[in-house]
Amino acid sequence: MIFIIYRVQIEKLKQHKGDNKMLNKIIRLISIALFSTVFTLNAQAAEKWDMPMAYSATNFHSQNGVLFADAVRVATGGEIDITVHPGGSLFKGAEIKKAIQTGQVPIGERLLSGHQNESLIFGTDSIPFLATSYKASDKLWKHLKPELTKILDDQGLVLLYGVPWPAQGLYFNKEINSVADTKGIKFRSYNNSTARIAELMGMLPVQVEAAELSQALATGVAESFVSSGSTGYDRKVWEHLTHFYEVNAWLPRNYVMVNK
């Protein structure tokens, strides 16, 4: 429509007799106005997306999210501008999936094993000792992806990508030589599997978000947990705990999803 109006105005000007210099000047002014209008419309069309993530800005998952946002910005010529919100600053980890589904945000990342009460398939990557290496994790992912994609599609979500954590180990505030040594310890859990492990080992499961882990350890809300070396480094757990046991229990994945 803009181009039609532009052409009509130019044709009308050409019908008038007069100074060609003035005519050319007017045409240039109209052209500049047209360019400015189109540029403004394109700028207005740019979409601003907020992307909540549960882990700290220094965590590699959050850094991946920033790189992904940069890549989307370049690939779309700035038409989609994603702002990453790490550390549970926008939504806590347990709230992110629902926030995407309900349209509160268009995109986000979530550890899906935290939702295995919705579907057992979500917790498959956290079955102890089913996949204990990156190679085994990739093989499991290859088989899980079609079904996982279908389930998320039914929930109004599109799976973009998934990235595994390093293998999970156990953190304690004392030396552990037997199950008897774990009795009564407050154990941070993040899904059904970790809560069940706590129960089987005589520990007390407590639900703590990753972003709140350091505070939970400092205040004694949690005294132990299972996670990767990456989490231990991010949360500086050596300030509160003394022992790490590399058991390579599983390699859970974080998944980035968008609302359909």
Image: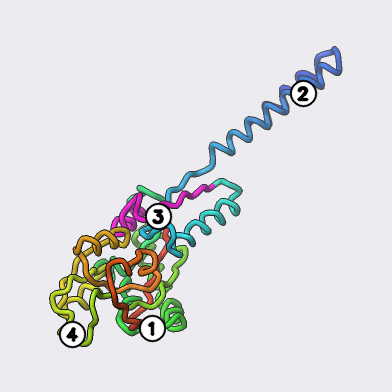
Q: Earlier in the sequence, mark 4 or mark 2?
A: 2
> Where in the figure is residue 19, as x and y percent of width and height?
86, 14
Do the CB atoms of the residues marked 4 and 2 lie less than 8 Å apart? no
Q: CA distance from mark 4 to mark 3?
A: 36 Å
Looking at the figure, which quarter contains the C terminus?
bottom left
Is residue 250 at least partly visible in the picture?
yes
**Magenta stretch in the rendered image:** 80-101
Tell me the kind of residue under disc 4.
Answer: Val
Q: Earlier in the sequence, mark 2 or mark 1?
A: 2
Camera-nearest label, 1 or 4: 4
Does the magenta run of residues contain 83?
yes
Tell me the kind of residue under disc 3.
Answer: Pro
Q: CA distance from mark 2 to mark 1?
A: 69 Å
Q: CA distance from mark 4 to mark 2?
A: 85 Å
Name the residue furthest top. Answer: 18
Residue occupying the point 85% across, 12% down = 18
Query: What residue sits right under mark 1 in the picture?
Result: 132
**Label of residue 27 in the image:** 2
Tell me the kind of residue under disc 2.
Answer: Ile
Image height of 80 relative to 67, above or below: above
